């Protein structure tokens, strides 16, 4: 009997302890929102708090964990130059280890405890899927998802707060497919796809132009680093060109494996996987008597570009990023992941500028819908933002790598998902340069 | 105490039900007085607690080590997602929870029959393989199971009677996430009452006998295989239920949510709290839920970069696990009990 | 040869051995008798260092054993065959025997192994089988053989007759007797089976509740009816 | 035909890598009856040490030796500091402890070395051989891998079967008390067992890393498949580890190439269950399964 009353006591005290813990957290909840006249969550007189989930630990951390450091550096740069309408941007990054369960937890934390104004750049398709309904339900602007999945923007009605940013994989696939069909009409085409929406949407786009030419489709599971069976199957199908929708590490792995198998087709890697700087440096290592000269190893590889990267240090945008990174970076060198983060951050700052001196959650969504098409920025093609579409950058150009640099093979081509035709971009987005101070005006 | 209350207290079931009632009141008090964010965390604690409760019975009472309970949570979560994919024709939630439990139970029986033939590290190997194999199934049957992106779960609306009852008692409206937290804790209390009764019953004694000395148990006429399979099935049913709650809380069932780390986290929750103790499992689940966030915040406040602070959570959690195993192998609950016994014997 | 002086040991708060003193003379068999829980096994464990004495000492040929690590005992010439026989069933017969030879200073080992095989021809046939296949009696022979390979001066044997048929027990005791005669071995034999033990022992020691009750010639003990009834159960 | 050959050969190399890892597990199992789940991160961190040395401009082989040596040291330290307190406790405590160690080393490596991909050089060629028209998907480095693993297996068999140290290590694992009474310095054997096993683990880490990319999680899948390989062969048998590794490597390669890479874990599970249901102690178990 005594045991049991004690157990009741213990059980209740566990719960009570939980409550205390919870109360502590609740006590720490910032209520700056109340200081502002407008009473907007996450916005005060002189700060605006935003956040995002990124994989900082675990298998997806290599590479992706650098993106938020790009964001941070650019916001610090903007803050050092007076902020946006006098407000400094606070960027809260939470680790989800690329696990949707954790994404859901950290997003709860960001929205309910950190009280962020908007989510900016949350990364990953399965991860962000877990929170997109919650964000829209809470009316939190869900801006510039770091993923090219179609669901970030094609269904404005059900996800009015969510905006894509990079060109979706289907758009990219279409442009790649058309290029191959026009330039290598007789080639046997093999697909090397990551086994998720990335590969799937890319394949959908490619197949619009290359129905019969595709003779082999191989999928790899992220995390399984032995791709020899897949590459062997592509080799067995005698393909002339491989279209890879994969991450940069798998670009390196396919190159190494192909070398092992003496397999030498033409390689076309979609933008995600091509990062010539990163892949080149990975492969250069093996040039020590093992493979060809490292920097030239990727020579002849075809890829796509939608923002200028570190391989073009003279590009005015890259010059700006370099300056930002030198002043406000968190160590290490400027990488394309960081450039990606800064480019996204630039778009956010522009959106915030457009939302006016008293930004609200509705206001920023509206501002992007109204003005988003006209946003200048590093993107080579304009955004598709409107009241009907929240899709991101509308196009890209096809380039060929040589000596670690990308040389354009086509002008910037734009299109949209579905049947939309592929057309040459005349907006001039590719040739603009950042403003003097490096901060957009809105 | 009245005679009636004493009579209730005297029976095991009565004690457990009374305890459950008190627990329910405590849960309501906590959930009503904490923020929506904390409600979400309590939902996480609930599903970790349910799964850890089942695992502590298997490992603590029956001595079988499973490194693959995350797989059964996945089974429960996917069952839930498949049943709740259509907002209009979704079956009642209680049926969904029961179905998730039942599916995990049936599959658990199959695995349990195989595992009962194996010993020690061989069970560990088989369950480890299971933990990594199950997410692959979701990728292979992309059409029905949604592939890498997983299946989204539509949480049914808060039923009117529940919302009214809650409003009547607490004068608060019930948000969807609070509703899920209630479901989680209700499931936890029900499953803990069942587990507690089971472990006090003849079945529980048989499990312990098998754990302590299987040869002696067999000589005493216990069917070892049946005892092992039963313990396995009970714990996988709990994992299935936990998976269902997880699916509701996360609103998604995706393979990347059920990687090996989940199974290992469950195991360390069980060990941290104290093997074989339901209270320990609950404490372990609480640690797992609250510790990472607390540690990360401390790290950030101490001026670490985001990356370093993010690695701090697993570091502290791994070190804690190691230290508990080395310094207090009976876990938090076991150590506390031993300390109390010592105090009592040396007044 | 083996001098035990005031040996006292405990498992936690429970005293297992309480001021036991006696001498096991060289080339003789000393039987240690007593009921279950009398402290017989604890006595052997304390001598060989598995249990550390809280007081008192055992001397092996004059050397104080109380600070010697267990691992050094076999080198000093003390072999302890624990209760339950201590055959490592996962190893082969020969591997078990080889282990016995590792614990003493280098001498010609092959010859020793062959000697054991001549003593126990059945072992020779199955030298490469796992010891798991041996019967209870054979396992007892194996551990005695293994202990001999360390060329001990003193052999501590814990319940060698446990669970064996009388015919096998007789065989084993005959073997012990002949070893004492041929090798001049000193044996301390812990036995529940007092009648058989006293039949081969030269001296007997009776323990009760950790204390020494009597120490005398085996023949004297065997003839003492009162003692037999009170402590030895036959 | 070419695809079949390539798939088989790359599977063979992959299987040898699982085998190397399985050998390390077998070694620890044989000497302490513990399955060391922290084997992979322990190896990973020593491979990073090699990488630091190679990056500093020293030769590959110096890094190689440094990794093996630090593996030896790390194994001994881990056994002394972390494992010793739980050696006489139930089996599950040691398992949990090594899982905790797994997480800790992982986090430390990510903090110290960063979590990005880095390439690790190989001392031999990375291009496949060609025989006439047929491409033989074996590189200089994969031949080295195969030979190294076979040599380690042979050495372990010799160690356990014919040397006194090996015998003492096994005796210590099976029955500490009897071993001590026979003069075996059990604690030293346990430390030696861990040190040796960690060294073999480091070797497997180096073999996986050679001509490939490393990051703190690069060996995680090997933990699972290496462990499955060891269990498949029977945790007590070095030959079993190699055979188990080969069976797993080759069959998973075919599953990956002809069915799909997402089901290789499932295939591993099926293979494991079939083998264990027929032989609960693994393919090469001699003694009856011991209760743990």
Image: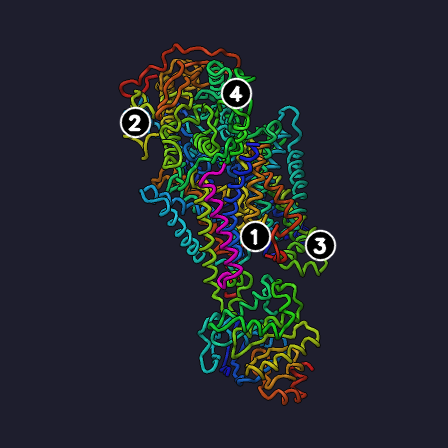
**Same chain for the residues under marks 3 and 1 in the image:** no
Residue B223 badge: 3
Q: Which residue is mark 2?
A: A322
Q: Position of residue A208 (x, y in %)?
A: 53, 16
Q: Indicate the secondary structure of the residue bearing disc 1.
A: loop
The answer to whether residue A70 of the structure is visible from this angle is no
In the picture, residue B156 is in which quadrant?
top right
Left or right, residue A80 beside residue D188 = left
Q: Chain ID for label 3?
A: B
- Above/below status of A6 relative to A106: below
Q: Which span of residues is magenta-colored?
A: D137-166
Q: Indicate the secondary structure of the residue bearing disc 2.
A: helix
**Same chain for the residues under marks 2 and 1 in the image:** no
Q: Chain ID for label 4?
A: A
In the picture, residue B187 is in which quadrant?
top right
Q: Nearer the viewer, mark 3 or mark 4?
A: 4
Q: Nearer the viewer, mark 4 or mark 1?
A: 4
Foreground of the two, D104 or A110: D104
Residue A380 badge: none
* Residues at marks 4 and 1, CA–CA distance in whole angstroms: 48 Å
Q: Which residue is mark 1?
A: D235
* Residues at marks 3 and 4, CA–CA distance in whole angstroms: 62 Å
Please say whether residue D138 is one of the residues in the magenta stretch: yes
Please say whether residue B24 is one of the residues in the magenta stretch: no
Q: Position of residue A190 (x, y in %)?
A: 52, 24
**Same chain for the residues under marks 3 and 4 in the image:** no
Q: Nearer the viewer, mark 3 or mark 1?
A: 1
- Label the magenta part by its dominant secondary structure: helix
- Above/below status of C162 relative to D66: below
**Classed neighbour count for the residue bearing mark 3: other residues with Cα under 10 Å, few (<14), some (14–19), many (≥20):** some
Q: Chain ID for label 2?
A: A
Residue A188 badge: 4
């Amino acid at each position: 009997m005594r045991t049991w009353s004690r157990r009741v006591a213990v059980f209740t005290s566990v719960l009570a302890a939980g409550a205390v813990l919870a109360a502590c957290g609740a006590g720490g909840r910032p209520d700056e929102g109340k200081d502002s006249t407008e009473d907007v969550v996450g916005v005060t007189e002189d700060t605006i708090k935003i956040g995002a989930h990124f994989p900082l630990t675990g298998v997806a951390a290599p590479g992706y964990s650098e993106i938020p450091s790009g964001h941070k550096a650019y916001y610090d740069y903007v803050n050092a130059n007076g902020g946006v309408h006098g407000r400094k941007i606070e960027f809260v990054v939470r680790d989800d280890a690329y696990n949707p369960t954790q994404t859901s937890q950290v997003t709860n934390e960001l929205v309910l405890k950190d009280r962020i104004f908007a989510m900016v750049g949350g990364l990953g398709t399965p991860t962000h899927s877990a929170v997109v309904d919650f964000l829209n339900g809470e009316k939190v602007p869900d801006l510039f998802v770091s993923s090219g999945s179609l669901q970030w923007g094609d269904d404005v009605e059900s996800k009015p707060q969510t905006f894509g940013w990079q060109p979706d994989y289907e758009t990219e696939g279409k442009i790649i497919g058309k290029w191959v069909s026009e330039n290598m009409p007789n080639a046997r085409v093999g697909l090397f796809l990551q086994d998720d929406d990335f590969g799937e949407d890319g394949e959908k786009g490619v197949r619009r132009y290359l129905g019969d030419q595709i003779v082999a489709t191989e999928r790899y599971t992220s995390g399984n680093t032995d791709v020899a069976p897949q590459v062997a199957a592509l080799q067995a199908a005698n393909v002339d060109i491989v279209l890879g929708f994969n991450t940069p590490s798998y670009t390196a792995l396919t190159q190494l494996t192909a070398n092992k198998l003496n397999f030498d087709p033409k390689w076309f890697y979609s933008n995600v996987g091509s990062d010539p700087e990163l892949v080149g440096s990975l492969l250069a290592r093996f040039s020590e008597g093992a493979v060809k000269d490292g920097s030239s190893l990727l020579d002849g590889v075809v890829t796509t570009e939608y923002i200028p990267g570190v391989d073009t240090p003279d590009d005015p945008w890259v010059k700006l990023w370099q300056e930002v990174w030198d002043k406000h970076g968190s160590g290490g060198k400027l990488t394309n992941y960081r450039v990606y983060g800064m480019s996204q951050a630039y778009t956010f700052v522009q959106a915030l500028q457009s939302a006016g001196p008293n930004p609200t959650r509705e206001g920023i969504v509206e501002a992007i819908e109204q003005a988003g098409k006209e946003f200048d920025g590093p993107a080579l093609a304009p955004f598709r933002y409107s009241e009907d579409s929240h899709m991101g950058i509308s196009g890209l150009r096809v380039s060929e790598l040589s000596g670690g640099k990308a040389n354009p093979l086509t002008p910037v081509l734009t299109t949209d998902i579905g049947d939309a035709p592929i057309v040459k971009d005349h907006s001039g987005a590719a040739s603009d340069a950042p403003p003097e101070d490096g901060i957009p005006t809105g | 105490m009245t005679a009636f209350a004493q009579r209730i207290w005297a029976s095991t079931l009565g004690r457990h039900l009374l305890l459950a009632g008190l627990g329910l009141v405590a849960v309501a008090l906590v959930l009503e007085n904490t923020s929506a964010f904390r409600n979400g965390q309590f939902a996480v604690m609930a599903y970790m607690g349910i799964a850890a409760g089942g695992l502590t019975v298997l490992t603590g009472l029956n001595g079988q080590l499973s490194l693959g309970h995350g797989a059964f949570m996945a089974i429960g979560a996917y069952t839930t997602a498949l049943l709740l994919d259509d907002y209009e024709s979704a079956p009642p939630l209680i049926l969904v929870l029961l179905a998730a439990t039942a599916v995990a139970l049936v599959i658990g029986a199959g695995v349990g029959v195989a595992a009962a033939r194996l010993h020690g590290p061989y069970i560990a190997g088989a369950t480890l393989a299971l933990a990594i194999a199950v997410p692959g199934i979701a990728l292979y049957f992309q059409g029905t199971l949604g592939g890498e992106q997983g299946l989204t779960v539509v949480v049914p609306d808060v039923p009117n009677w529940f919302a009214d009852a809650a409003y009547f008692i607490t004068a608060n409206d019930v948000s969807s996430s609070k509703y899920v937290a209630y479901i989680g804790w209700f499931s936890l209390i029900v499953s803990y009452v069942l587990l507690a009764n089971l472990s006090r019953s003849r079945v529980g004694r048989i499990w312990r006998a098998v754990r302590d000395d299987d040869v002696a148990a067999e000589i005493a006429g216990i069917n070892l295989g049946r005892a092992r399979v039963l313990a396995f099935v009970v714990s996988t049913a709990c994992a299935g239920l936990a998976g269902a709650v997880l699916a509701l809380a996360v609103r998604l069932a995706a393979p990347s949510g059920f990687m090996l780390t989940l199974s290992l986290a469950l195991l360390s929750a069980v060990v941290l709290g104290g093997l074989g103790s339901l209270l320990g499992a609950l404490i372990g689940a609480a640690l797992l839920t609250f510790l990472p966030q607390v540690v990360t915040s401390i790290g950030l406040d101490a001026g670490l970069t985001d990356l370093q602070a993010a690695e701090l959570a697993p570091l502290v959690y791994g070190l804690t696990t190691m230290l508990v195993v080395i310094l207090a192998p009976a876990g938090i609950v076991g150590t506390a009990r031993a300390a109390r016994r010592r105090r009592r014997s040396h007044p | 040869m083996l001098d035990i002086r005031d040996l006292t040991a405990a498992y936690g708060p429970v005293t297992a051995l309480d001021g036991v003193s006696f001498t096991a003379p060289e080339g003789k068999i000393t039987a240690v008798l007593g009921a279950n829980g009398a402290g017989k096994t604890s006595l052997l464990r304390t001598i060989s260092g598995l249990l550390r004495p809280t007081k008192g000492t055992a001397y092996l040929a004059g050397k104080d054993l109380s600070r010697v690590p267990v691992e050094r005992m076999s080198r000093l010439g003390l072999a302890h065959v624990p209760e339950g026989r201590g055959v490592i069933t996962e190893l082969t017969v020969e591997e078990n025997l080889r282990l016995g030879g590792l614990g003493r200073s280098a001498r010609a080992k092959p010859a020793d192994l062959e000697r054991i095989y001549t003593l126990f021809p059945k072992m020779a046939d199955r030298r490469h089988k796992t010891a798991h296949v041996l019967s209870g009696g054979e396992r007892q022979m194996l551990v005695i053989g293994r202990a001999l390979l360390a060329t001990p001066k003193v052999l501590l044997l814990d319940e060698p007759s446990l669970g064996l048929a009388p015919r096998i027990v007789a065989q084993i005791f005959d073997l012990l007797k002949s070893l004492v005669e041929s090798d001049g071995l000193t044996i301390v034999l812990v036995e529940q089976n007092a009648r058989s033990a006293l039949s081969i022992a030269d001296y007997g020691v009776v323990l009760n509740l950790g204390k020494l009750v009597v120490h005398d010639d085996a023949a004297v003990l065997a003839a003492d009816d009162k003692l037999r009834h009170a402590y030895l159960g036959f | 035909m070419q695809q079949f050959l390539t798939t088989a050969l790359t599977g063979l190399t992959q299987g040898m890598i699982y085998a190397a890892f399985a050998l390390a597990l077998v070694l620890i199992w044989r000497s302490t009856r513990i399955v060391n789940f922290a084997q992979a991160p322990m190896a990973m961190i020593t491979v990073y040490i090699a990488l630091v040395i190679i990056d500093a401009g020293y030769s590959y082989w110096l890094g190689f030796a440094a990794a093996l040596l630090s593996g030896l040291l790390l194994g001994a330290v881990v056994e002394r500091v972390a494992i010793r307190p739980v050696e006489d406790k139930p089996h599950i405590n040691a398992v949990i402890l090594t899982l905790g160690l797994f997480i800790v080393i992982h986090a430390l490596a990510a903090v110290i070395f960063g979590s990005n991909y880095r390439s690790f050089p190989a001392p031999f060629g990375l291009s496949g051989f060609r025989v006439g028209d047929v491409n033989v998907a074996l590189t200089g480095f994969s031949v080295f891998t195969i030979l190294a693993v076979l040599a380690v297996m042979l050495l372990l068999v010799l160690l356990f079967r014919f040397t006194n140290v090996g015998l003492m290590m096994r005796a210590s694992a099976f029955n500490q008390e009897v071993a001590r009474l026979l003069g075996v310095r059990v604690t030293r054997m346990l430390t030696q067992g861990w040190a040796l096993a960690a060294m073999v683990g480091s070797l497997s880490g180096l073999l996986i890393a050679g001509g490939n990319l490393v990051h703190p999680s690069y060996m995680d899948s090997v933990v699972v498949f290496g462990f499955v390989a060891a269990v498949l062969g029977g945790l007590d048998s070095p030959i079993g580890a190699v055979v188990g590794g080969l069976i797993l490597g080759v069959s998973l390669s075919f599953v990956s190439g002809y069915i799909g890479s997402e089901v290789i874990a499932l295939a591993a599970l099926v293979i494991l269950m079939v083998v264990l249901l027929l032989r609960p102690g693994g393919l090469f178990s001699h003694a009856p399964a011991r209760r743990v």
